[in-house]
Amino acid sequence: MDISFHYFAVKTVARAAGLNEKRAQRIAEYSQFIDDYNQFAYTFAKKIPSYVKAPELDIVYNETLKIINPVTTGFYTWDDYVLIASPRQQRLTVVPYHFIPMNEQKMKKENDWRTVPATLNNGSYIADELKDLKNDIAKGTINENDALMKSGMLLHTFADTHAHQLFTGFLTPYNSASLVSAFDNITGKDITKEAQYWIDKFLSIIKKFIPVPTIGHMILGHVPDLTHISFEMKYKGSDGKIHHHTRSNTEVFANVCKLLYDYLKDLPYATETPTPWNELEPLIAKGLLVNAVKELEENEKNAVKKLTEHWSKIFNYNYEYSSDKIRNSFVNANAPLEVMTVELDGQTVNLIGTDYSDEFFKYNLFADKHLVKLYGPKPRSWFSAENIEFYDFPVFD
């Protein structure tokens, strides 16, 4: 899914479910920001709060030097795609936030890491995390501001299980799907040739970074994420046979909106009268019927502009998203960037750091806790480029 769903549809559903403007905005912006947070480099922080020092976490790389290892959740620029080729980033970024497997049984006993569409109570990792969050809210063990941020982050991964079903975030031949057909749900026209052009254009760029792009749904470009199309693909199942998968993204994503609506309207923060789902459903479908392929390829600003104009014609809600605004909130007001020279892994490096805000640490906290849920305590400290053989990778026969 792209920003049309992760921000615009989520913001719309949150407002319709009874959350006020401020609460809905916080959920929606952190839903989208999962795709946009691409801080890979170590940094140093003038102050480190105690809550990120919990023994199961690995956010603090060196407490004495105050070095922080940010928890990367997304890939924002083309240059970021170089890192996706790394098994480390597949395991720690691509899989957990965008192609999460269903649960431990699927992942370990069945050796199947592919994404399965989640519901709110299907025993999946992501459904359990949402349930745990709702329980924490009810018990008062998480404050409202944090709960809204964490809700947005988890709802991104939850929604992606539907768009990314049948794919895994690891490099594997099982991601070698091929497009059979595609239709534009706005015009009703066959756009198979056009969609294949989008795919070939994407692959021509991505292959500069990743020679074998069978990671996630790269081999189909952005087709599984586009809200306005229907498509059919061929793929190889775990049984070794060729299967077909056909779906309308518009219909599937609208159904995901219903799941999000059901979750959000039951939160204690939904204090306004909700819009009945039978009234909301046809309007949500209209919202999803927007072709912003060109603008999405250009830049965030152009995509937000087009999508804001589109969604605002259907809903009387405020839409405003800027990943830079969120990044700026991660630094305390007027705090300057500073450089610290340190010895790191036997090399002298210059680290850029500053006085980071609570927003920065809370985002990294919730992102790291998500990894702990999937892999166990200190999920990133076990791995390094030099010790890659210690990974327990899925092997598809």
Image (cartoon, rainbow, N blue to C red):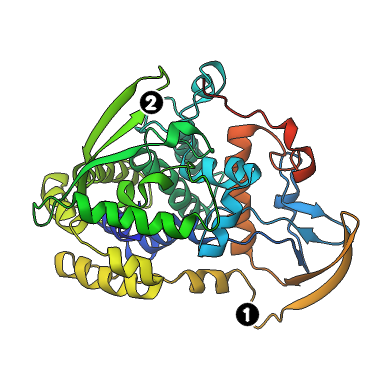
**Residue at point 62% right, 54% down?**
364
Q: Which mark is residue 333?
A: 1
**Left or right of residue 244, residue 388 in this image:** right
Percent x, y of residue 347: 88, 60
Percent x, y of residue 42: 74, 61
* Pointer 2 local density, CA inside 10 Å: few below 14, some 14–19, many at least 20: few
Among numbered discs 2 and 1, the one appearing first in the sequence = 2
Q: Amino acid at mark 1?
A: Ala
Q: Secondary structure at mark 2?
A: loop
**Residue at point 69% right, 39% down?**
379
Between 179 and 74, the residue placed more toward the observer is 179
> In which quadrant of the rendered view does residue 351 lie?
bottom right
Q: Which mark is residue 122?
A: 2
Marks 2/1 in contact by CB < 8 Å: the verdict is no
Q: Which mark is residue 238?
A: none
The correct choice, above or below, for 158 with respect to 299 in the image is: above
* Pointer 1 local density, CA inside 10 Å: few below 14, some 14–19, many at least 20: few
**Left or right of residue 221, residue 287 in this image:** left
Could one spot residue 340 in this view of the protein? yes
**Left or right of residue 117, residue 352 in this image:** right
Between 234 and 249, the residue placed more toward the observer is 234
Between 385 and 151, the residue placed more toward the observer is 385
